[in-house]
Amino acid sequence: MKTITVSSLRTAALAAALLLLPAVASAKESAAADRTESLLARRGSIPVAAAGPYVEVGTYGIQVAVKLGRPSARLPDGTWLYENFSAEDSAARGTLVVRFDQGRVSSLTLATPAVVAALRSAPKSGVLVAQQDRR
């Protein structure tokens, strides 16, 4: 019978650990991406810092049109919708909602289809009014 030495066991353990290292790193990256996706699913929308390298809060509307192209839809309140956007380094996908104030981007949001449907069906005045149900 052959005897297994301690150094052989250490070498085997080290080799096994090195083989598992990429899998562990990949799991950590996907967990971060999954966090963004789950936040979007839970909240319906998440704020976005930038859309690509050139569009962020404060960008002029004309620059948004040049960098992102024509929006998929424009809402009566001046909001632009860009379908099929995804969060960087994440599986989260949705519609980019670009809001403007005085011709400049005031907010960027990634939204789910349900939130976009609600935005599309909102009153044209842009003001929501709530009243008490008196049943």
Image (cartoon, rainbow, N blue to C red):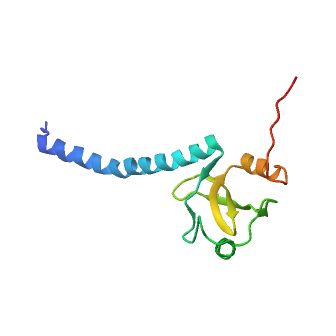
Q: How many marks?
A: 0
Q: Report the residue that reaches farthest toward the top.
A: 135
Q: Residue at x 77, y 51 (%)?
A: 119
Q: Position of residue 42 (x, y in %)?
A: 62, 40
Comparing 58 with 112, the one in front is 58
Q: Residue at x 51, y 50 (%)?
A: 33
Q: Quadrant of the N terminus?
A: top left
- Left or right, residue 64 beside residue 32: right
Q: Is 36 located above or below residue 70 in the figure?
A: above
Q: Quadrant of residue 81?
A: bottom right
Q: Quadrant of residue 50?
A: bottom right
Comparing 126 with 32, the one in front is 126
Q: Is 28 located above or below residue 48 in the figure?
A: above
Q: Quadrant of the C terminus?
A: top right
Q: Position of residue 20 (x, y in %)?
A: 34, 47
- Left or right, residue 61 beside residue 46: right
Q: Residue at x 69, y 69 (%)?
A: 103
Q: Position of residue 18 (x, y in %)?
A: 29, 51
Q: Quadrant of residue 77?
A: bottom right
Q: Position of residue 30 (x, y in %)?
A: 48, 49
